[in-house]
Amino acid sequence: MRIHNPEPNPGLGMANFRKISLNGFGDGYNAYAYSMVWFKNHLYVGTGRANLALLRHAMPSVKMETWPVDCPYPVFSPEFEQTCARGEIWRYEPISEVWERVYQSPIVRGRDGSEFARDLGYRSMVVFQGKSDLEPVIYVATWSRSKGWGPLILRSEDGKHFEPVSRPGLSGYPITAIRLLVPYKGKLYTAPTGASGGKVNDAGVAIIYETDDPAKGEWRAINEPGFGDPSNVTIYELAGFGDYLYSGSGTLEGFQVWRTRAEGKPPYHWTRLIRGGAGRGSINQGVISMLPFKGALYIGGGIQNGGYDNRYKVGPAASEILRIHPDGSWEIVVGNARDGKQPLSGLNAGFNNYFCGYLWRMGIHQGWLYAGTLDWSVILSFNRPEIKKTRGSRILSAVGVNNLVDSRGGAEIWRTFDGENWLPVTRTGFDNRYNFGIRNIVSTPHGVFIGTANPFGPRVGQWHEGEWSYVDNPQGGLEIWQGT
């Protein structure tokens, strides 16, 4: 008897996608689709606001000929707080094709008596049922302000009303952001990601918390800070895979990957699988994404601040995808050959793109793994650098900045059915150079939804007739795309 093995479904290409939201839901300050979940027949999107305006305030050492976006209001001024800084949550009903804003950060009063937006954005969102929840609900992690009291966890039963329920640990630390909410074995896990002083991806401490009842706020630490290694300054990613909870850290010596069975009494026993950026050192600075796929754990790396760490002078360098097997062994999927290991895909770091600063987000839809990047080449439009003897400068000399950005600017999405053979979906940010990052990929009964990072709004710098000016940018602000 002959057994017929059906061919895999063809997957989604550029022609299968349509844009369902543009210009940050009509507000270019909605810059990042920070978080996305499917809940009760709706797609939910948590935004990050005015990211480039905030970066200019937090990191004045970053120099360009002109700042990419117009920053008309000083940070913490009443105009900035009301107009630019209030994080939002939106939801979409696919049948009616209607978007609705269901939450906006409140304005609160700080220790100094000033008023400001409590939440700049919502960097993580998950559907989870804790001990006190009668059914699955939405939990949301906030990005707080340097003047505030630290990040919160919000909870919603109906997707319309969101209330703070807890603040995970770390009193006394200047923590401002949580990037992770990860369910595993009936518990919810999180870790601090950012701190005040412009350290949006550097908490200064690598510690993980768990709870089986986030509504009650009963969080407990499950590892020794930094796993006993002070070079681990933050936890970027967590993922449950098989019998283990995996952690990916950020360190100037190169990321580390640890795992635990998460059993017994915390702090749990952890085993390190990878150190030193998997043999690549500091240019594999952090684990940015993690996702189990067909029997292996795929991890995407990157260098903070878009592929060049200005604060610590790391990079620029293109990012890699590795995969870890249940026995703890690992392989290079997309990346640079070293130590006898070759990239299984035949593709070098960044899918052969020097400007790929992150492998930012991965998602699975109908048996295909989709990987989205951050491409920082658009930044060259605002800063004509002195030509130096680097690979990047040779590319610029050969093709020119404008030609490069016009033809290749924008984030990339690639897909694979087996983890080794990859096909491009888009290499130009869905034909928008300002979509410089793919921030979320969520599979639903109505197709796969992809949210971009696009902080180049509402007004963007433009060089014209020998001078810089700011003009309205109809392609600025996050976008949401639906693939079916």
Image (spheres, rainbow, N blue to C red):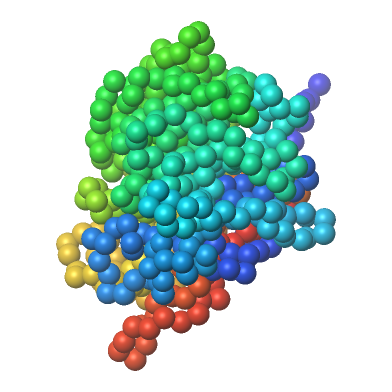
Residue 288 as seen in the image, left or right of residue 431: left
Using the rendered image of the protein, determine whether residue 47 is visible from the camera's viewpoint.
no
Residue 49 as seen in the image, left or right of residue 40: left
The N terminus lies in quadrant: top right
Residue at the spot 70% in from the left edge and 46% down from the top edge: 161
* Image x and y of residue 252, in percent: 25, 38
The single residue placed furthest to the top in the displayed view is 264
Residue at the spot 67% in from the left edge and 21% down from the top edge: 131
- Residue 310 image-quadrant placement: bottom left
* Image x and y of residue 71, in percent: 40, 71
Near-viewer residue (222 or 464): 222
* Image x and y of residue 204, in percent: 31, 36
- Note whether 240 is above or below 269 in the view shown: below
Near-viewer residue (440 or 447): 440
Residue at the spot 51% in from the left edge and 19% down from the top edge: 244
Near-viewer residue (192 or 284): 192
Count how many numbered circles sit on residues in the image: 0
- Note whether 2 is above or below 192 in the view shown: above
Residue at the spot 41% in from the left edge and 74% down from the top edge: 72
Residue 188 as seen in the image, left or right of residue 21: left
- Note whether 299 is above or below 448 in the view shown: above
* Image x and y of residue 28, in percent: 54, 68
